[in-house]
Image: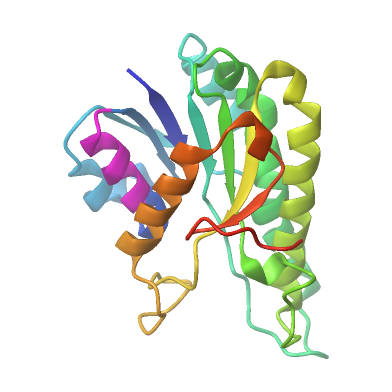
Amino acid sequence: MPTVLITGANKGIGLAFAKSFAVDGWKVHACCRQPDKAVDLKSIEGNVALHKLEVTDGLRLAGLAREIIDEPIDILINNAGYFGPRMPFGETDYDDWAYTFLVNSMGPLRMAEHFVEHVARSERRLIVNISSKMGSLSANESGGGYVYRSSKAALNMVSKSLAIDLQEKGISVIAVHPGHVQTDMGGEDAPVSISKSVSGLRKVITKVTEADTGKFFNYDGSIIPW
């Protein structure tokens, strides 16, 4: 049975991923900060294991890695993210900026470091980092968004370096843009539904080969410039 580990699985894109993989018969390790309150996640039918996890907590990450040490992880999806405050130039909250980096940029690297051997022992051997087009230097035509943009740009660099460093283990690493999605972060008026985003991302993930490692994909399968 193929296995996927998903962070931030209690709502939005993470929850939709968990449902989608469970329906397809995958073993799902669904991680979130408060699993006791994750009513929708608990209601998913299938082989779903819930784990309490905060991606900024290195000790807890290490503990979970030990708990499931014997389980190969075919796909690690680093989905947990934080937008941070929408601050204009001149009103930057630098403490919040630091926290945004902890979650969006350092969190996925922590996950990769703790679960790399689990992924390496699997058949699929894939790490998927949920990034954003807002982290693309080339695509930035509107300015602003310093906190979120910079954290996702850093995640893109983490993804590229991981793709190079983990190649010898046969692990592929990609960054993906889910689109402007109707989530708590994207807002209810966003143009892309959660189901459309996750359906597209599942297709991208399915088609990824070792030749695609280090690339930045849109949810529709197109390549986004760094």
Q: Is residue 24 magenta?
A: yes
Q: Position of residue 92 (x, y in %)?
A: 78, 81
Q: Looking at the image, which residue sits at the far top?
A: 70
Residue 114 versus residue 7 in the image, above or below = above
In the rendered image, is residue 142 in sight?
Answer: yes
Q: Quadrant of residue 54?
A: top right
In the rendered image, is residue 10 in sight?
Answer: no
Secondary structure of the magenta portion, mostly?
helix
Q: Quadrant of residue 108?
A: top right
Q: Position of residue 27 (x, y in %)?
A: 32, 26
Number of disc labels: 0
Decide if residue 182 is on the left or right side of residue 156: left
Q: Is residue 167 magenta?
A: no
At a point 49% along the width and 22% down the height, the residue shown is: 73
Decide if residue 190 is on the left or right side of residue 96: left
Residue 22 versus residue 98 in the image, above or below = above
Decide if residue 98 is on the left or right side of residue 4: right
Decide if residue 29 is on the left or right side of residue 100: left
**Quadrant in the picture for the C terminus:** bottom right
At a point 27% along the width and 44% down the height, the residue shown is: 19
Residue 196 versus residue 29 in the image, above or below = below
The image's colouring method is rainbow
Q: Quadrant of residue 134?
A: bottom right
The range drawn in magenta is 15-25
At a point 61% along the width and 64% down the height, the residue shown is: 132
